[in-house]
Image (spheres, helix red, strand yellow):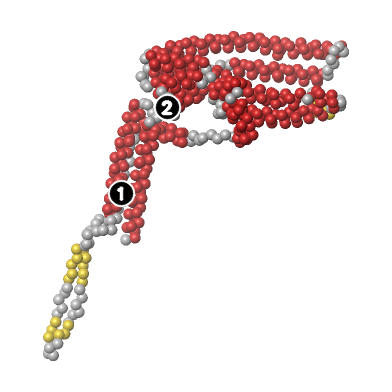
Amino acid sequence: MKRDKEGYLKDLKDAVSKEVKIIREIVSIHSGLSQTTDPEEKTLTDSHINSLKTALKKATGEVSGILEDMSIVKPLPQSKINMPVAKVQRASTDKLVVKEEIKPTITIKSAQRPPKTKKTRHKIVDVEMTDLEKKIIKRLKKKKEEREKRKEKKASKYVNLSNKIFGGLARDLSEKQIFLTLKMDIIKANLQYVIASYISIMLFSTLIAIFVGFFIMLFFLFFNIGAEWPIITSVTENIGTRFLKVFWIILATPIVTFLFMYFYPSAERKHRENKIDEELPFATIHMSAISGSMVEPSKIFSIMISTKDYPYLEKEFTKLINEINIYGYDFVTALRNVASNNPSSKLAELFNGLATTITSGGNLSDFFDKRAQSLLFDYKLEREKYTKSAETFMDIYISLVIAAPMILMLLLIMMRVSGLGISMSTSMITIMMILGVTMVNILFLTVLHLKQPQT
């Protein structure tokens, strides 16, 4: 009996676990189905969900059958009592002599049940899927896992410390007119800071730069850095005269730090504007093809986000979708809001033109097609301008890096031999030429990299 109970419990546990597995599969497919727009994928996933529902009904029937078998309340079994007749014999003394002791025997016939084996138990039939259905289910599950991996970003300890020290002052300064331009640059550059926090970081970084500048000034107050060995030497001149020469370091370091922090959002906004303008012509062609299928206009941007082909435009499109789904604006209002807060003027024109087209009832496919042609024409002009500027930089590079060092080295050697002007050793001239050529190369590479359009 103990083995039978353990068998029932094991069967019940297996059946319930299969039910749970099927339910999780249905929920997972439903959550992924809301993210797809392909009608063929929806048809295949609906068919697979129906198959899973059928399998769930079978699993439920199995659980019910096992519970009925485990029921404690059962009908009473039929019983039959056989009472054998004792043989008696009268003795001469008129006493009864019992020849056989009467022993009642009871035979109980219980309802016969066939033993339950693994072959006779209910079994959930696995739903057979085609290769295409398996690929679709796998992709939907992968999308769900990617969404679950996203975590909330928290402010760093540096930002928290800056807010604790300069938070009150930064909130007062954020209302000043001088920081309104900085506020718009932070928004358009998509920096993950509010204006008060960024001003706190600026002030805290400037405070640190004052101490850094003080230690640098102390170093140069007592030491010099030269080109010949030993590189670091002690100062021999008067301490007061030396102090007047290096005092500017303690003022220049915090000023440069503050100006860098102030203009960094503007530089980042300009960088994002260039990247968006490079992606926009090809993204507009893509949107023109999607709009030809007569989908709802906001779905066009959801599809563009899912492609992951336009990383800089993706953030702007995400802001547009958030305006609709989170803030509750209608599509036209969301387009105008995002147009006023994005770094690219071309993207702003696209959003405003799209809002006007939707309001006036125009054809979206024709709008995207015409706008793609104009943007692609501008992109070709930018490529031609870059080619011409690269040729000009090549001529300047040849003049500065090849001809100028040779002429300068020749002049320095002649001055050293004749004793005219500043007399420098051969090693000093060599070091100057190497450093000069290196700095010019770094400068040219930086300029070309900044001006180079994305291919």
* Dot label at residue 390: none
Q: How many marks?
A: 2
Mark 2 or mark 1: which comes first in sequence? Answer: 1
Estimate how packed mark 2 is, as few (under 14), some (14 to 19) or many (20 or more) residues with alpha carbons within 10 Å. few
Q: Position of residue 73 (x, y in %)?
A: 26, 58
The residue pinned by badge 1 equals 63
State if disc 1 and disc 2 touch (CB < 8 Å). no
Residue at the spot 32% in from the left edge and 54% down from the top edge = 8
| Figure quadrant of residue 29 | top left
Residue at the spot 67% in from the left edge and 10% down from the top edge = 396
Q: In this view, does 267 lie to the left or right of 412?
A: left
**Along the line of sight, which residue is nearer the eye, 446 or 438?**
446
**Along the line of sight, which residue is nearer the eye, 174 or 447?**
174
In this view, the mark in front (2 or 1): 2
Q: Name the residue type under label 1.
A: Val
Estimate how packed mark 1 is, as few (under 14), some (14 to 19) or many (20 or more) residues with alpha carbons within 10 Å. some
| Quadrant of the rendering where the N terminus is positioned | bottom left
The residue pinned by badge 2 equals 328
